[in-house]
Amino acid sequence: MSAREDILTGLRAALAHSKPFPGAEPAAFQAVTRIDPGEDLVARFIAEVQRVKGEVHTAANDDEALDITKDLLTSHHVRRVVMWDEAHLPLRGVWALLERLGIERVYGDNASVAAAEAGITGADWALAATGTLVLSSGPGRPRMASLLPPLHIALLTEDRIIPRLEDYVAAQRAARFGVFRRSSNVTLITGSSRTSDIEMHPVFGVHGPLALHVVLIKNLD
Amino acid sequence: MKAESFEKIVDHALADRQLQVALDRGTTRGVNARLLAMSETTDAQALRHQARLARERALNQLPELLEQLERNIIANGGHVLWARDAAELNQHVLTICRQHNVRRVVKGKSMVTEETALNHALEQEGIDVVESDLGEYIIQLAGETPSHIVFPMLHKTKEATAQLLHDKLGMPLTDQPEAMTRFVRGVMRQKYLQADLGISGVNFAIAETGTIATVENEGNNRLSISAPPVHVAVMGLEKVIATWEDYAVLVQLLARSATGQRMTVYNNLISGPRRPDEPDGPEAFYLIILDNGRSRILASEYAESLACIRCGACLNACPVYQNIGGHAYGWVYPGPIGSIITPLLRGPLTAPKLPYASSLCGACQAACPVEINIPDMLLKLRRDLVQAGDPSLGWRLGMKGWAVAFKSPMLYRLGGRIAGWLTRVLARGKGHLRWLPPPFNGWTAHRDFPAFGTPSFRERYLRRFKGQPHDSKKP
Ligand code: SF4
């Protein structure tokens, strides 16, 4: 018998012999993280990102957002970036900005991407309760942009902010989980990389980005 | 583990000042972080129960869910392999390595590969393996094994860590964890980029979409999964869950219980290899599903232990773990849950003392996010040992006597050597106990309880009576 058959047969026999948890019924689902009724989701998102050592820069419009992005790139002495295609960013003019600043856009294999000092991405969604960004991989959306460079700049509009992980799951269920067929990798990012391995003492900036900056753009009402 | 050496290992652990400092600093932070993080949820009790039911539903339908998982992964372009035991899992990985001409492997954290000793198997075939988790990497450098399922180097102080990095890699000495971390980041970068294959563990496998979920903070796991051209994920078969709603509650309780975070920094959701239109990510994806005794556990009265999500909360909360650390438990899984699954996975007589390395105080069960009744299973394992004719009978009877004696002050006075041994464990060689199990916790809530002296009063009294010099060393 193959290992597969062996194992499945063994499991079926085990469960037939004694169904270990006869009473387990699907329960009504309760969300984990508290959000107060009427709480301002944008304010909550900003506070939560700051709590996990990310920075949020609010922009009243696209011009302000471009200015903030420019300041971030110049203050970090960025000369190369790996970025999502502009079609997947909520902000026009980033590419033109890079050209004006003489910043090179790198593509391709990991070795060239590893030379980039910054990654620029959008985000599918943001979760207010935990300060989490949801990024899915896809054409024009390399995984490495949010992972390999020391600086991660995420561009986000306020209307992408939803309350919690549970709301993200509900939305994906309504969409029949298409994202998990299209994207080999969905990543939930909460703050900049950290470790507590040495005496459970938190240190920020380990193997992933050392710094996470969210440029949060107001929607025109 | 070698049964006869358990007390020796424990005595060494208690005498090891470096270990005691590291355990003190680490477990205290761990317990406090969890308590705070659970207390600020919508309803900690209701959520634990919800998480428990999610695990129970998964265990009840294991064969169907595993088949569904497999179907969905294949539909997404991945491969699924099954392994009855450790050797078969290692063999699968070696075969994949040969198929893809792999010489260098980078690994994210995986307890299952510790269970199968995969690194050793790969190294024997001349394949270079690097652990990429900071703690796992440092332990690999030191030639040691993890002592905690979440914080693998909990047994090491920052001073010992700095010395190791200095000796092995020439890092300038420092007592700043920040500086050490930055140094290791530099060393690891190239390793990710050069690796031919990345191996990761699995925290949850979501059957309904064929997605594996990993949980981490450092980014090493994401890099190990995304940078090399081949990704191999390995999981114990109990890791499968039915739905994304179950994932949502479990992953958040895992973070809160393990590290006190609301979410870990990265939650990676992998559904097969990179799609043809995607710019990066591995071209090949394999999931290996390991049994290695788990289906046997499912058939037993210990099935509940398969609900474990490996958060480590029961380790941090356990007064015995707090004092002896993870290595004393002798195998991959330490602490209260380790005392259960080690004998279950390896056979009861391989670790006859682990079920007794507990005062049955219940701190583990109170900490567990999926309400596993650890004390109850420890008692049942003790019963099984008696029935199996455990050879270390005298020791066992002593421990059993101790457990009974704790409930009876009169008997307690007669507890003798074994009581002395376990109170010294609980007092971690400092001469006092910060904490006693019920019914004595009323005492230690406000004051320390002195450990039994070495030698005991009774022994000293007898020596004196016989005219021997009085040992004046402070106990
Ligand atoms: S038994 Fe419970 S507390 Fe212990 S590691 Fe498993 S899930 Fe966590």
Image (spheres, coloured by chain):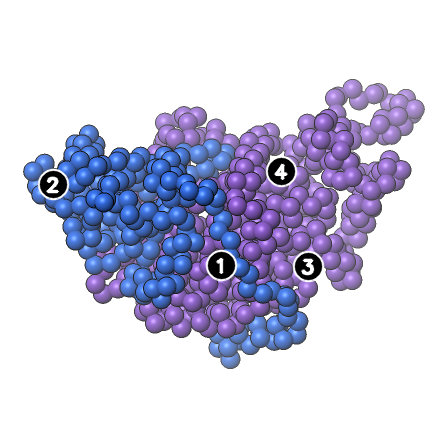
* Depth check, front residue: A8 or B64: B64
Classify residue B105 as left or right of residue B242.
Answer: left
The residues tagged by marks 2 and 4 sit, at their Cα atoms, a distance apart of 54 Å
Type of the residue with mark 2: Leu
**Which chain is home to disc 1?**
B
* Depth check, front residue: A95 or B290: A95
Q: Colour of chain A?
A: blue
Give the numbered dot on residue B246.
1
Q: Secondary structure at mark 2?
A: helix
Residue under label 3: B348
The residues tagged by marks 4 and 1 sit, at their Cα atoms, a distance apart of 31 Å
Residue B10 horizontal/vertical position (percent): 66, 40
Q: Quadrant of the C terminus of chain A?
A: top left
Against B329, is B186 above or below? Answer: above
Which is nearer the N-term, disc 1 or disc 3? 1
Q: Are marks 2 and 3 in contact (CB under 8 Å)?
A: no
Residue B75 visible here: yes
Q: Same subunit under labels 1 and 3? A: yes
Give the numbered dot on residue A98.
2
Q: Nearer the viewer, mark 2 or mark 4?
A: 2
Q: Nearer the viewer, mark 3 or mark 4?
A: 4
Type of the residue with mark 3: Pro
Give the numbered dot on residue B322.
4
Q: Secondary structure at mark 4?
A: helix
Type of the residue with mark 1: Asp
Which is nearer the N-term, disc 4 or disc 1? 1
